[in-house]
Image (spheres, rainbow, N blue to C red):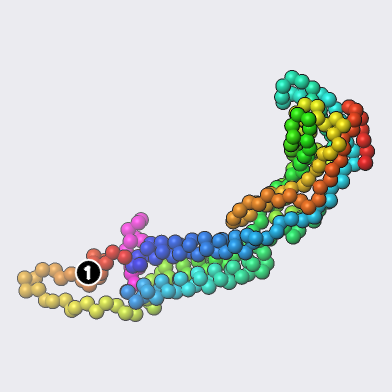
Amino acid sequence: MNTVLSRANSLFAFSLSVMAALTFGCFVTTAFKDRRVPVDIHVSKVMLKNVDDFTGPRERSDLGFITFDISADLEPIFDWNVKQLFLYLSAEYATKSNSLNQVVLWDRIILRGENTKLNLRDMKSKYFFFDDGNGLRANKNITLTLSWNVVPNAGILPLVAGSGHISLPFPEKYEATKSY
Amino acid sequence: MLSVFKSIPTHMDYKGQKLAEQIFQGIILISAVIGFVYGLIIQQFGWTVYIVLAGFAVSCLLTLPPWPMYRRNPLPWQPVAPEASGEPTQKPQDNTKRKKHK
């Protein structure tokens, strides 16, 4: 500690260790928090087409179009350890050929500081709702769920399913539009 | 140009080094506690980091330059013994620079 450089060295190393301990403390204060919030999903229109699936084998597959509304208040999730939320809307259903299908229809990133009240109306899906085959037609039960990934400043990244989901049947015929 | 920096005396005596270490550890710990509590209250971790950085800056100012309060207990060197053969006597400053590593 006789020269400026050695004093600066021990000072800086001590500050970094203290900073690491503070970050751990930040993680501990929010580690066991429940990140679920009630979510309200409403579907206004469903359409079904049977087209050539360009991403898979050369057969015609079912392609669904959904118009939906989402409303949720995500304010309670954000605290000092949350950097951003990654939301995604997924559809889950069973067909004759596959017992479990999950398709992501729409996603969005919400940073801390942005508006946390979601009130989306008449949203179209961002990604194609292709089925592996023809399982969407006359499918009685397709469940839409809004889930999110919490990206923290320090610690674990929990994957949380929202508390609201909606099940809806698909139309029986192609190019048919069903309004709810 | 580097020789200008090397010729500035930056030493502290032992008690001064201990005092400097206690001072910067205390300042950084206090600013860490204040920063943690403030960040927890307003729910923004950025402010915790800012407060700890401010504590770091204050302790840099207080402990890096060799203020006179760190030189109050100089080592009691023996007086220079007169050499009979007329060799040049070593100054205590040179002894300090050679014997201690830090």
Q: Which residues are magenta?
A: B1-13
One can see residue A127 in this view: no
User: Which amino acid does the dot numbered 1 rest on?
Assistant: Asn
- Position of A51 with respect to B20 (left or right) is right
Q: Position of residue A88 (x, y in %)?
A: 74, 44
The answer to which of A132 and A120 lies nearer the viewer is: A132
Name the image quarter holding residue A96: top right
Q: Main secondary structure of the magenta part?
A: loop
Please identify the residue farthest to the top as the structure is shown: A58
Q: How many marks?
A: 1
Q: Which residue is mark 1?
A: B95
Q: Position of residue B4 (x, y in %)?
A: 34, 60
Indicate whether residue A121 is drawn in magenta.
Answer: no
* Residue at image coords 68%, 60%: A33
- Position of A180 with respect to A158 (left or right) is right
Above or below, A167 relative to A30 = above
One can see residue A72 in this view: yes
For the C terminus of chain B, give its image quadrant: bottom left
Please identify the residue farthest to the right as the structure is shown: A179
Q: Position of residue A161 (x, y in %)?
A: 73, 49
* Residue at image coords 22%, 69%: B95
- The chain letter under disc 1 is B
Q: Position of residue A22 (x, y in %)?
A: 55, 64
* Residue at image coords 76%, 41%: A90
